[in-house]
Image: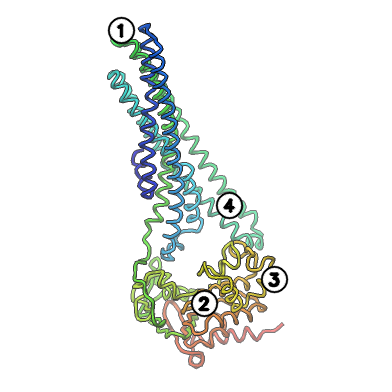
Amino acid sequence: MFKILKRFFDFCDKDDRKRFYTSIVLSLLQAIFEALKIPAIACLVKAMLENNVTKSTCITCFVIMLVSIIGAGLVKSKAQMLQTEGGYNTCANKRMQIAEHLRYLPMGYYNENSLGRIMSVTTNTMQNLENVATRVVMIVSSGLLSTAVITVMILVFDYRIGLILCIGLVIFFAINNVMMNASSDMAKRKLEKDTALVEKVIEYIQGIADVKAFRLTGQSSRELNTAIDENEYANSGMELKLIPYMTLQSFWLKAMGTIIVLSSVLFCLSGQMELLTCLIMIISSYLIYAQLDNAGKYSALLRTVDVSVRQAQEILDTPQMDISGENISPAHFNIEADNISFAYEQKKIINGISLDIPEHTAVAVVGPSGGGKTTLTSLLSRFWDVDEGKVTLDGRDIRDYSMDSLMKNYSFVFQRVYLFADTIANNIRFGQPDAPMDKVIEAAKKACCHDFIMQLPDGYDTVIGEGGASISGGEKQRISIARAIMKDAPIIVLDEATANVDPENEAELIKAIEELTKEKTIIMIAHRLKTVRNADNIIVIDAGRIVQQGNHSELMKQDGIYRTFVKSRQEAASWRL
């Protein structure tokens, strides 16, 4: 229990940890105020036993009780405020830390971990901590502190009852420890099923078009329903399995109170304890039960808190790419790859590639599917770090650059465009959030998307759906090109930007790309002949190696993959209906 509490506090940021520690101190003060009820009652009972109840006695008891109630209320209010602030701030800060940490993880992390798992940590896991952890941690801490204060007071009044109480507490914590161990696997299973449910929901929504097209609605629904049922079973199963332990804890606390009452009465009847002390012990037994019962019940959820903290910390502990380089502004934008190699899960993807891309030239990367084209461009732009060799920009190893200073030099237009659920203007100015509207419009015009934007209900203020769901593929591509034009980076990486565009949009898109790539260093993955043939250098990648290299004319004279590629495209283009 104490290890879990410590792990949670260590997980919190410094300021939030300070809030929690302050609230614990205040909880201790609250426990002291609550304990003041005992001497107040003792004072009054003593006067009654001595038949000496005076106005002064009543006022004294009333003042002590008033101080106890008001003091405990004020301190509790402040402690709860600090706990709430600490809990929400911790989760908000950790969400931002995780998001920032994810920015600099190698792309392999996203291959090994599903989107659903990552989303589950940033949503379900953080929500568990946000809604559950704060209350659980503080109720348990407050209950333990109150119990400790009352135990000390009982030991002061009568050490024999104090020893009985200590023995009872040892048994209580033994039961609680068994319950905590029982909840360990269940808490892990609960969060696993939470994650699985998020994964299935995302998979179902993202693949809804294919589900309908292939008439898999029933099958996919069954898989989703199974995930929902398993999640329900894991959550309800955890509750049901813990009920017997909670019942046993509660029963033992009541039994312990009964033992203290009986022991006090027996000591009193045998003349070994004064009646006043006996009455104080009886009253104290109920105070202990009330405080510790809440702490015991909520402590069952500490395992959920612990697993949630571990899941979030696992992401934060995942080694980032080394981003602590220098803030370098290159004078030239020539890129070189010197005998680079890269493997993923022991499979060699890039094997000893050397490449020279002078600035203001265009290099096209072609080759069979799975040959390593996308991986090569990812290595050249440091989405991955090479295993062997090095990639340089203006003669400096790109690992010498800080990540932010390196990314300033690159703009990307991917085959699969992602737009955010925001206005079109904000999507275009994504790389420059403070860019004025006239710059946004200028970039949109260069990207040939101004006209269709103005036809939308709210023009540039039109809010598009998540992922750009409310506009066509060609329109999304042109907005992404406008975004790249706005950034105005000297190096452009194109991942077959026209591959999935209809013929009506292709002409506009090609114009936009020509505007984007003026006087730039260009790296493009291409499958279309018209995109490739004008490149200054064409490299053909197969099985992670460069098997051919040259311009279009040179490669057409060679018998190899490129000429086969061109002929297949020409034959496909000659078909007519």
Residue type highlighted by circle 4: Glu
**Residue 258: percent from the left, percent from the top?**
40, 18
Rendered view: 108 above or below 276:
below
Rendered view: 505 above or below 425:
below
Q: Is residue 186 visible?
A: no
Residue type highlighted by circle 2: Leu
Mark positioned earlier in the residue sequence (4 or 3) = 4
Residue at 36% across, 61% down: 319
Q: Report the disc number at residue 223.
A: 4
Disc 2 and disc 3 in contact, CB within 8 angstroms: no
| Mark in the foreground, 4 or 1 | 1
Mark positioned earlier in the residue sequence (4 or 1) = 4
Frontmost residue, 543 versus 503:
503
Residue highlighted by disc 3: 455
Mark positioned earlier in the residue sequence (1 or 3) = 1
Q: CA distance from mark 1 to mark 2?
A: 93 Å
Residue highlighted by disc 1: 270
Mark positioned earlier in the residue sequence (4 or 2) = 4
**Residue 278: percent from the left, percent from the top?**
35, 13
Mark positioned earlier in the residue sequence (2 or 3) = 3
Residue at 30% across, 11% down: 273
| Mark in the foreground, 4 or 2 | 2
Residue type highlighted by circle 3: Gln
The local secondary structure at tag 2 comes to strand
The local secondary structure at tag 4 comes to helix
Disc 1 and disc 2 in contact, CB within 8 angstroms: no
**Residue 101: percent from the left, percent from the top?**
41, 60
Residue type highlighted by circle 1: Ser
Q: Report the disc number at residue 494.
A: 2
Q: CA distance from mark 4 to mark 3?
A: 42 Å
Q: CA distance from mark 1 to mark 3?
A: 96 Å
Locate the C terminus and report the quarter of the image it occupies.
bottom right
